[in-house]
């Protein structure tokens, strides 16, 4: 399924948060959104998921306007894992994943063996089967995050929106999660802070700053020394990889160097 944003604009507290946001994601494409804190990534994800309404502009799913689709119809097509997803205090891990099946259940389609199997698979894919009977409130931040992903996969969407899904995860689970999501072949839009993960996994990247798209394109065309310096105020070396992607090496700042030098001089005195 494709997703298109056309001239999106969003205001909050009388302030322009997002403006001139236009882009399209093709079926099966893995699109990354990167940008500094406060650049508008989460706000954009919320507009794309339909949980916030744009002041102007439209979101289209396979050419249909999102705001004209019912909540259930949207949830059958699109799953959203928010950055600070709500807690579900009194339920067990498995029940949290079972919630992903809700949009597919109805008066004529009660809970079935297929639903059970889909939930089993979703739990297994995030390595949480052994914790399925644990109460939600006893789980760590990373375990909860993996269950949110499992819930989204159990929803069997065509489009997956993930807002910083690797928050709270150790490096094994960060990579495992991105590999798992990539392997699903879904249309994915993911906000990421780790630029190397964006370079490794994304087909295309949108770089945002101050609520606008600064540039968009293949990782090696977006994650350049110049773009990263002007948007993130960080100096980097970008090394080209043999597979056409790139790897970013961060330089220590001048201030860091001076502090280290001072520390070394005072300890040597
Ligand atoms: N409901 C709101 N009311 C007022 N301002 C808001 C609201 N929601 C977001 N903002 C502001 O909009 C800007 C963009 O926020 P947003 O959360 O979209 O950024 P982000 O790129 O996801 O940041 P981060 O990387 O820190 O998660 C911020 O300045 C934020 O304070």
Image (tube, rainbow, N blue to C red):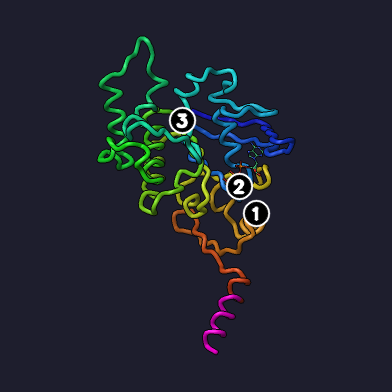
**Along the polypeptide, which appears first: circle 3 or circle 2?**
3
Q: Nearer the viewer, residue 190 or 91?
A: 91
Query: How far is mark 2 from mark 1, CA to CA?
Result: 8 Å
Q: Is residue 208 above or below residue 55?
A: below
Proximity of marks 2 and 1: CB atoms separated by less than 8 Å:
yes
Residue drawn at (52%, 88%) of the image: 268
Dot 1: what SS? helix
User: Ligand 1 falls in which quarter?
Assistant: top right
- Image spot of residue 258 (x, y percent): 61, 76
Residue drawn at (38%, 13%) of the image: 106
Q: Which residue is mark 3?
A: 79
Query: Which of the two discs, 3 and 2, sits closer to the camera?
Result: 3
Instruction: Read off the magenta span.
Output: 259-269
Q: In the rendered image, which quarter contains the C terminus?
A: bottom right
Picture quadrant of residue 65: top right
The answer to whether any part of residue 188 appears in the image is: no
How many numbered discs? 3
Dot 2: what SS? strand
Picture quadrant of residue 113: top left
Proximity of marks 1 and 3: CB atoms separated by less than 8 Å:
no
Residue drawn at (27%, 35%) of the image: 133
Q: Which residue is mark 2?
A: 207
Report the predominant secondary structure element of the magenta stretch.
helix
Q: Is residue 259 above or below residue 80?
A: below
Q: Is residue 246 above or below residue 266?
A: above
The answer to whether any part of residue 43 appears in the image is: yes
**Along the polypeptide, which appears first: circle 2 or circle 1?**
2
Q: Which residue is mark 1?
A: 231
């Amino acid at each position: 399924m494709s997703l298109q944003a056309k001239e999106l604009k969003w205001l909050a507290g009388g302030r322009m948060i997002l403006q001139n946001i236009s882009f399209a994601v093709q079926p099966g494409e893995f699109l990354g959104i990167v940008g500094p804190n406060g650049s508008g990534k989460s706000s954009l994800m919320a507009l794309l998921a339909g949980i916030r309404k744009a002041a102007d502009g439209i979101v289209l799913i396979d050419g249909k306007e999102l705001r004209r689709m019912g909540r259930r119809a949207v949830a059958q097509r699109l799953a959203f894992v928010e950055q600070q997803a709500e807690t579900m205090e009194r339920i067990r891990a498995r029940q949290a994943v079972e919630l992903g099946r809700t949009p597919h259940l109805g008066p004529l389609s009660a809970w079935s063996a297929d639903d059970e199997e889909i939930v089993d698979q979703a739990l297994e894919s995030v390595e949480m089967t052994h914790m399925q009977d644990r109460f939600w409130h006893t789980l760590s931040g990373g375990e909860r995050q993996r269950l949110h992903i499992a819930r989204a996969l159990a929803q069997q969407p065509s489009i997956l929106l993930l807002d910083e899904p690797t928050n709270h995860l150790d490096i094994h689970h960060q990579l495992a999660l991105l590999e798992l999501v990539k392997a699903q072949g879904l249309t994915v839009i993911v906000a990421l802070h780790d630029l190397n993960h964006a370079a490794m996994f994304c087909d295309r990247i949108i770089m945002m700053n101050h609520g606008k798209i600064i540039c968009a394109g293949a990782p090696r065309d977006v994650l350049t020394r110049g773009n990263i310096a002007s948007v993130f105020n960080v100096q980097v070396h970008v090394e080209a990889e043999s597979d056409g992607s790139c790897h970013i090496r961060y330089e220590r700042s001048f201030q860091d160097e001076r502090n280290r030098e001072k520390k070394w001089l005072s300890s040597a005195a």
